[in-house]
Amino acid sequence: MSDQDGRDREQDERSPEFKPYHHPAAGWGAAKSVTGFLIREGELVNGPRAIRKMNHENGGFDCPGCAWPDDTKGLHLDICENGIKHVTWEMTRKRVGREFFATHTVSELSEWSEFELEDQGRLTEPMRYDADSDRYVPISWPEAFELIGRTLRELGSPDKAAYYTSGRLGNEATFLYQLMARELGTNNLPDCSNMCHEASGRALQAALGTGKGTVDLEDWERADALFILGVNAASNAPRMLTALAEAYHRGAQIVHINPLVEAAATRTIIPHDFAKMATFRATRTGTLNLQPRIGGDMALIRGMAKAALEQAREDPGAVDMTFIERHTTGFEEYRALCEATPWEEIEHQSGVSVADIRAAARIYRDADRSIASWCLGVTQHEHGVDTVREIVNLLLLRGNLGREGSGPSPVRGHSNVQGNRTCGIDHRPATAFLDRLGEVCGITPPRHHGLDTVGTIEAMHRGEVTVFVGMGGNFVLAAPDTPYTSAALRKCALTVQVSTKLNRSHLVHGRQALILPCLGRTEKDEQRGGLQSTSVEDSMSMVHLSVGMKRPASTHLLSEPAIIAGMARAALPDSATPWEAYVEDYDRIRDTMSQVFDGFEDFNRRVRQPLGFRIRQPARELVFHTASGRAEFSAAALPDVIPAPGTLALGTMRSHDQWNTTIYSDNDRYRGVKNLRTLIFMNADDMRERGLSQFDDVDITSTAKDGTTRSLYRYKVIPYDIPRGCAAGYMPEMNVLCAIGDYSTQSDQPIMKHLKVTVEPSA
Ligand SMILES: Nc1nc2c(c(=O)[nH]1)N[C@H]1C(S)=C(S)[C@@H](COP(=O)(O)OP(=O)(O)OC[C@H]3O[C@@H](n4cnc5c(=O)[nH]c(N)nc54)[C@H](O)[C@@H]3O)O[C@H]1N2
Ligand SMILES: Nc1nc2c(c(=O)[nH]1)N[C@H]1C(S)=C(S)[C@@H](COP(=O)(O)OP(=O)(O)OC[C@H]3O[C@@H](n4cnc5c(=O)[nH]c(N)nc54)[C@H](O)[C@@H]3O)O[C@H]1N2
Ligand SMILES: [Mo]
């Protein structure tokens, strides 16, 4: 039921529902949801055809969804509900052409919902904002590049521009993008990682001398115990369900640590297990669930370490002293700290009983090989870095590093967010990398650090950054403090968004603004040198090729490498970089990359191997590029995470039916919610204390570090199995509550999982 605008009226009329979900994750619920989605998108024929090409070891394109690695045994249905939705969303037949923009002013479009904007379909040609008519009007590619080039050439200082990346940019485009920024003279390369796993990168770098996890899927298959913290895998990394189900079959212990008991913590039916699909038989995916309070993970892990050290007094096998002596530093200080941290404090700060912590510690003791895996529930906190380091401390205690089936395994977000960092998107680049880049590419890279996401927003606000280029993503909605970020973008002289679909970041723009439409990952990328492929790196450091198979959504689309080269050429008329040659044949980009990056030697050959190649992980081989040359224990004091009386700790998260700022529907199947996103999950006792019942309207007010407040009105409250003092709701709507200054002093990451709020009935 759409009206003339193509806007979905039906959505507004449905009333919210809440019914706790009792079925296994994935299985027929997922199948039904996918079918409904394919029908809605009119892709019942093309969708399945494309999906068969996804994540194949030979050819095919990499699922643009999450960064979970592909199955290594050629599993031909290694796909998930959300990956299918993601691909179908890109492949839609709907188009946003010049007629659309001629019909709607930007002010009018600003009233539309996120769903309505993206639902208009794929962008088809470059558009320029015309202030007189308040509309986007067509512009040719050469004119668009010249506008960007001229503006950048006249900037005065290269640091007055910032170049954002959302984590799906392929490695080759990534390399060109950072090269352009550095040839221009800036390290202003904010990226979505600044809001995502910055804390993991910093912690792992400090502890192990590598910014990444050390394990791969085969390790997952060999672990005796898996500790899964702060991830909603059934929605956000659904292919992890396969690994969890297999681990359970094998008899491995699986401990989930999350204030919410998410669907992946109980049971699943994995899609390629046809027999189970047919008989509705589910496999368990968890053996112990612990529900810490929001921010309580560090205390919980400290408790497990304390228990291990206590046990070691009579059971020498509880701690691996040989490993500790040979490979680590800082152990004595850490041991003393664990001993000095009272159990009462651990229990109070974690919100988990000593008995439960000891149960987890026993599982850890009994496992020869353990993996700890985590996502945003651990990182988006004030003490995210300390918490990741505490996880590493625990792993080091029993030598769970550098051998099969053990180690740290962060679950990365966007499909190539890890590759972006590997290939140079870093506002704090290492000196050695800049030296190599300068030498190989014949440029003089800037040495001073650039701006990250929060830094860029603040600088735009102050008028110090006046050009914003977004390579993908939806910056205004993904970033914290939506009104503040909007005002910052509006102060810019020029905003450029390279996108596949219409989104809010096109409507919140600078004095001049461009929308540059690009090929999606599912589409054929034909250049002079023939059909091109791009490479991506998954969460477990596997680099492989992705090649599109669909006809592009429009003949006017350019690939991301071509768009970057076009901008670079216009901005750097005297550049010695062979931009055109790079775009003709991406093998040439890879040849250059192989000289710049360790681990990319012989890139073109190795990336064409059936599963690609794995970038060497020094820490996995017990080689530590740390200050001491050893793995380093940390000894940080436990933070106080107890909410002040009358306040709650609020974590913002994704629903099942969304991809970051892309909202597919207002449902959250595994949490039992239908037709509602403006909600807050609360503990029933906290609700009673405030005189609240299910679906009551409430106003939520956050108090920032600087004491300022921000509010959301008329949210519906839902009683949920969540510890007292904790609450949860959805990003990006709730980003309004996260002040620009609310970022971690350890990682500079916005503390999106730990906002301090009060909740009261709406007037
Ligand atoms: N379908 C789909 N897939 C996605 C995405 C998507 O939006 N949709 N986004 C992608 C991206 S960019 C990323 S980074 C990942 C994000 O993947 P997740 O990290 O799963 O993302 P969130 O939805 O933010 O969920 C965070 C989880 O942390 C828990 N949590 C909150 N606070 C705490 C805490 O203090 N401690 C612990 N232990 N847990 C806590 C929440 O209950 C929730 O289960 O997923 C990627 N994959
Ligand atoms: N409150 C709160 N805020 C958060 C988070 C949270 O948990 N809580 N999570 C944070 C995290 S982890 C992340 S990663 C960020 C996500 O931040 P972003 O990466 O900036 O946002 P996305 O929603 O993933 O971007 C969606 C847009 O990408 C464009 N797009 C899709 N495919 C392509 C492509 O192939 N090429 C190009 N050029 N564009 C494409 C489309 O136009 C689409 O509208 O949000 C962060 N914000
Ligand atoms: Mo992310």
Image: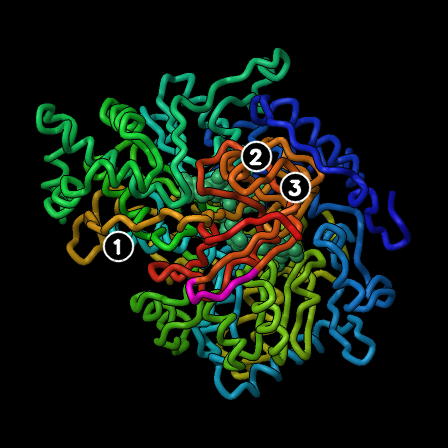
3 vs 2, front mark: 3
Is residue 535 something one can see in this rendering? no
Residue 404 in picture, x, y percent from top left: 28, 31
For mark 2, what is the residue?
A: 719
Q: Residues within 10 Å of mark 1 (few under 14, many from 20)?
A: many
Residue type of the residue flagged with mark 2: Pro
Q: Residue furthest top?
A: 279
Q: Which residues are magenta?
A: 705-710
Q: Nearer the viewer, residue 71 or 383?
A: 383
Corner quadrant of residue 674: top right
What's the mark number on residue 725? none
Q: Nearer the viewer, residue 299 or 54?
A: 299
Compared with 280, 404 (above or below) is below
Residue type of the residue flagged with mark 1: Ala
Residue type of the residue flagged with mark 3: Asp
Is residue 624 something one can see in this rendering? yes
Mark with earlier residue (3, 1):
1
* Tag 1 and tag 2, C-beta contact below 8 Å: no
Compared with 375, 441 (above or below) is below
Q: How is the image coloured?
A: rainbow
- Asked which secondary structure carries label 1, the reply is helix
For mark 1, what is the residue?
A: 206
- Asked which secondary structure carries label 2, the reply is strand
Distance from label 1 to label 2 (Cα)? 40 Å
Q: Nearer the viewer, residue 71 or 532?
A: 71
Main SS of the magenta segment?
loop
Corner quadrant of residue 432: bottom left
What's the mark number on residue 696? 3
* Tag 3 and tag 1, C-beta contact below 8 Å: no
